[in-house]
Amino acid sequence: PDSTTAQGIVTAEMVDDVARKHFPPCMRNLYGRLKGDHHLKHFGRLQLGLFLKGIGLPLDEAVVFWRRMYGSTMSDDKFNKEYKYNIRHSYGQEGKRSNYPPKSCQQILTQNQPGTQDAHGCPFRHFSPDNLSSFLTMTYPQIDKSSSEMRDILDSVKSTHYHVACTRVFELTHGIKKGEGLGDNESVAHPNKWTDRSRELER
Ligand code: SF4
């Protein structure tokens, strides 16, 4: 089935652990905001929701996951009426029944530019350099704020090579030599590729 990967099913219960170990920066940001605010705006829900489908969260677990994340800030009635439909829709179970694929980096970088209240998008492209370096050091303790690696990352961002910066973060957080990327010099072009590769490396 579409919602399972080589690593098998991810349950609602497992998401937190998988996030901590295997989410790329864009998804760490979205998940962190969702956890803190018990809320995400439309494009954030879409970006994170399709990504989670791609890592192997089945529809019934997605419903459990989102219900839990919204918590008591939302009534069951509102959740069932407004949100459940959208979750089912993104799994191809409502409306046109299209099974929407998770978004690629290219789509995240160029579509639906986030406003100041939004959490979707790509931190390398959409954060200020200051916010980006704080966010990266808070999220990934392997990266030091005043290190030459951080300067490298910010230089890549400055020259708009966002995938280079993201690939460097992958290498630094997985003990991989510079230039090897996801393996065979492949750079990050899809958030789900980051997670799939990261989970493979763990096994
Ligand atoms: Fe996410 Fe891609 Fe940006 Fe990395 S480069 S943070 S995977 S959108």
Image (cartoon, rainbow, N blue to C red):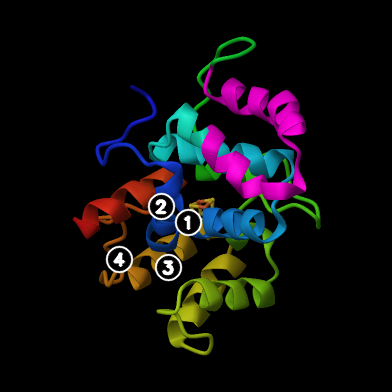
Q: Which residue is mark 1?
A: 163
Residue 103 in sight in this render = no
In what element is the residue under mark 2?
loop
Q: Which residue is mark 3?
A: 169
Which class describes the residues within 10 Å of circle 2: few (<14), some (14-19), or many (20+)? many
Main SS category, magenta section: helix
Label of residue 179 in the image: 4
Label 2 vs 3, first from the N-terminus: 3
Amino acid on which disc 3 is placed: Val
Amino acid on which disc 4 is placed: Gly
Label 4 vs 2, first from the N-terminus: 4
Q: Is mark 1 within 8 Å of ligand 1?
A: yes
Rendering coords of residue 42 (x, y %)? 73, 38
Question: Which range is magenta?
Answer: 63-92
In what element is the residue under mark 1?
helix
Rendering coords of residue 111 (x, y %)? 67, 39
In three-dimensional space, the C-alpha distance between marks 4 and 2, rounded to whole angstroms, equals 12 Å
In three-dimensional space, the C-alpha distance between marks 3 and 1, rounded to whole angstroms, equals 10 Å
Quadrant, the C terminus: bottom left
Label 1 vs 4, first from the N-terminus: 1
Label 3 vs 4, first from the N-terminus: 3
Residue 166 or residue 156, whichever sits in front: 166
Image depth: mark 4 or mark 2 in front: 2
In what element is the residue under mark 3?
helix
In what element is the residue under mark 4?
loop
158 vs 79: above or below: below
CB contact under 8 Å: marks 1 and 2:
yes
Q: Which residue is mark 2?
A: 188
Residue 2 in sight in this render = yes
